[in-house]
Image (cartoon, rainbow, N blue to C red):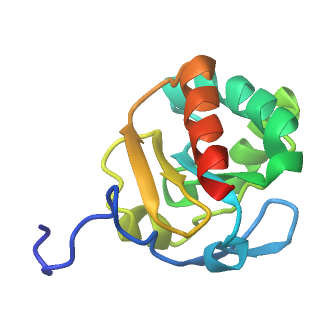
């Protein structure tokens, strides 16, 4: 439990909702994505493990987006800059949505203490697993996403 009596987002709990603007100027609201499997990753461009796992997330996104999988890589912009995030995204050819957490709202809401932190969220909006730190291996990403896709059926 945290000081406020609200449990930190963890497996078995509904993922806290948020709305953020992306690098592309779109607006994304987590609850609007219900019915899809979500990999919510919170990262910063200066973070070596964050940088290391992004190519694997891009490959998973390319392979699974047609099957109802969304990769949301929330840039902890309160600890980064939009320009640095954009440079990293461009350099790595990332095509999944990059919401910008400019106020730190999502970083606080999800009680992120270490970057990267990833949340695997089922189609029902419930967090299935939290992975703190990284980089996550592509095999781990694939196995978790495959499991969540099976749950959708």
Q: Is residue 147 left or right of residue 104?
A: right
Taking depth in this image into account, of 86 and 37 the one nearest to the observer is 37
Any part of residue 23 in sight:
yes
Quadrant including the C terminus: bottom right
Taking depth in this image into account, of 103 and 121 the one nearest to the observer is 121
Quadrant including the N terminus: bottom left
Q: Where residue 98 sits in the image (x, y, percent)?
A: 73, 54
Counting every numbered tag in the picture gives: 0
Q: Where residue 144 sits in the image (x, y, percent)?
A: 55, 36
Taking depth in this image into account, of 139 and 43 the one nearest to the observer is 139
Q: Where residue 126 sits in the image (x, y, percent)?
A: 46, 65
Any part of residue 74 in sight:
no
Residue, x 62% and y 39% (percent of image)? 145
Residue, x 44% and y 59% (percent of image)? 127
Q: Based on the displayed image, in which of its 4 quarters is residue 61 positioned?
A: top right
Residue, x 21% and y 70% (percent of image)? 7
């Amino acid at each position: 439990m945290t000081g406020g009596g609200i449990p930190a987002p963890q497996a078995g709990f509904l993922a806290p909702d948020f709305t953020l603007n992306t690098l592309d100027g779109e607006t994304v609201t987590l609850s609007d994505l219900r019915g899809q499997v979500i990999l919510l990753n919170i990262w910063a461009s200066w973070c070596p493990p964050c940088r290391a796992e992004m190519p694997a997330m891009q490959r998973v996104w390319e392979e699974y987006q047609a099957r109802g999988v969304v990769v949301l890589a929330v840039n902890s912009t309160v600890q980064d800059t939009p320009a640095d995030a954009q440079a990293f995204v461009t350099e790595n050819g990332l095509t999944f949505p990059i919401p910008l957490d400019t106020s730190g709202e999502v970083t606080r809401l999800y009680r992120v203490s270490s970057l990267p932190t990833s949340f695997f969220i089922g189609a029902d909006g419930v967090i299935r697993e939290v992975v703190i730190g990284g980089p996550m291996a592509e095999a781990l990403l694939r196995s978790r996403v495959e499991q969540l896709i099976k749950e959708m059926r």
